[in-house]
Image: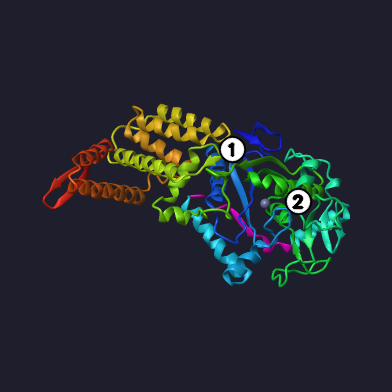
Amino acid sequence: MKLYNTLSKKVEKFSTYEEGIVKMYTCGPTVYHFAHIGNLRTYIFEDILQKSLEYLGYDVKRVMNITDVGHMTSDGDTGEDKMQKGALREHKTVYEIAAFYTEAFMSDIDKLNIKRPTIIEKASDHIDTYIEMIKVLLEKGYAYQAGGNIYFDVSKFPNYYELSGKNQEDLLVGVREDVEEDKSKRNPADFGLWFTLSKFENQVMQWDSPWGRGYPGWHIECSGISYKYLGEYLDIHCGGVDNIFPHHTNEIAQSESFLGHKWCNYWCHGEHLNDSTGKMSKSKGEFLTLSLLESKGYNSLVYRLFCLNSHYRSQLVFSYEAMEATKNAYQKLLGKVASIRNDRSGQKELDKIEKYEQKFKEALENDLNTANAVTILYDVLKSDCSNETKLYLIESFDSVLSLDLLKETKIEKELEDYIEEQIRKRNEAKKEKNYELADKIRNDLLEKGVELKDSREGTTYTFRK
Ligand SMILES: [Zn+2]
């Protein structure tokens, strides 16, 4: 397996601390609102990474947090408290908001066929772990108390700029724009580990600590939960590219200072989903959720396929035209698989199975080239393999692609809906005496293996073998 490592800025050969076992940490959602489909792209990438490693024979132990405390609207610990913002918006408590949007997130990832991580933990359930780590960071001199808060002193961690590739000057530019900067910090880039001086009135989530009642910083959550469930050594840490700085940069600083050694070997980041205007965010334009796509007639797996058709490290441009094209491709794919399944002829050809599985593995091993992996699936469908061989390979590949290619009810429902929609369009065309269009629809369906039969009672269809 070769993976691009943000730490070295190179595609590297992957190896694990413990043979055959991958310890993988993936940053979870901040549950104050629905997940944006751009955020979900990152979870699809992480799912493909996990399933590829499993396909290659690794045993993957994956942990994800649910951020329900400490995350501000700016990742640099400034701005509003996201959870409180959600609570005010909906006239609910922060706990109700967290419960509701955690459920919504889980439902989204289920719809996308994303395997739930082995361990999913709420940030607010691990306050003791953060306190224990902060105590050690203070004892070792990496952290200090100022203005009532506990900060990490970035000048004590020489590799602070390694992951982001930024330098101190780059960071200062960002910090200077920040008017809310706490003047008691030693360095502008120092970040909060524990806040006792809440600038938010009626902050609900507060806990006792040796430094006063307060709440943890966002970054310590992931370091804490990872340490508690995966131990001192981590193989892969993932997130979106926007997590590289400051979130993951800060995680490395505090974890390695706490542990006293290197922590995680591979840092893998998924690129943004953009629209034609640039980065999509929750604040501008339409708030794109999975439910919105569904309401417009796009099955969640159409979105999954859309993501798989591009590389996780490339920016992907979202448009409804692209969704429409992917929807057609997906329906066509399901139609092809259905026709193969309806004719289970021939024997399993082991040599061909081995050949195509090898090609599929090579695509995944090449820094998760999912677009190539999908192409290999098409190659199999077009090949001279027996239908038994094809079905075996489709099932094998779909354990990673997770497009429900062999899920009967889904295929039939999708296909039925599609055919019925086409018949309706054809009847309309006939009514308007647009016979050219009516014939085109009939021929298009025929090409997909669906034969229409007209009678007095209406139009029926059969699948041609
Ligand atoms: Zn995180």
Residue 287 percent coordinates (x, y): 52, 55
| Region of the chain picked out in magenta, as a range | 113-127
Q: Disc count in the image? A: 2
Q: 322 above or below 228?
A: above
Q: Is residue 192 magenta?
A: no
Q: Which mark is residue 313?
A: 1
What residue is pinned by disc 2?
177
Residue closer to the observer: 95 or 79 = 79
Q: CA distance from mark 2 to mark 1?
A: 29 Å
Q: Quadrant of the N terminus?
A: top right
Q: Which mark is residue 196?
A: none
Would you say 255 lies left or right of 434 here? right
Residue 38 percent coordinates (x, y): 55, 48
Q: Is the residue marked 2 within 8 Å of ligand 1, measured from its CB?
A: no
Helix, strand or loop status at disc 1: loop
Residue 386 percent coordinates (x, y): 33, 31
Q: Is residue 126 magenta?
A: yes
How dense is the environment of label 1, judged by Cα within 10 Å: few (below 14), some, or many (20 and up)?
A: some
* Nearest-to-viewer mark from 2 and 1: 2
- The amino acid marked with disc number 1 is Arg
- Precedes in sequence: disc 2 or disc 1: 2
Can residue 335 be seen at all in this image of the molecule? yes
Q: At x 30% / y 51%, what residue is drawn?
A: 417
Residue closer to the observer: 40 or 123 = 40
How dense is the environment of label 2, judged by Cα within 10 Å: few (below 14), some, or many (20 and up)?
A: few
Q: At x 37% / y 45%, what residue is drawn?
A: 406
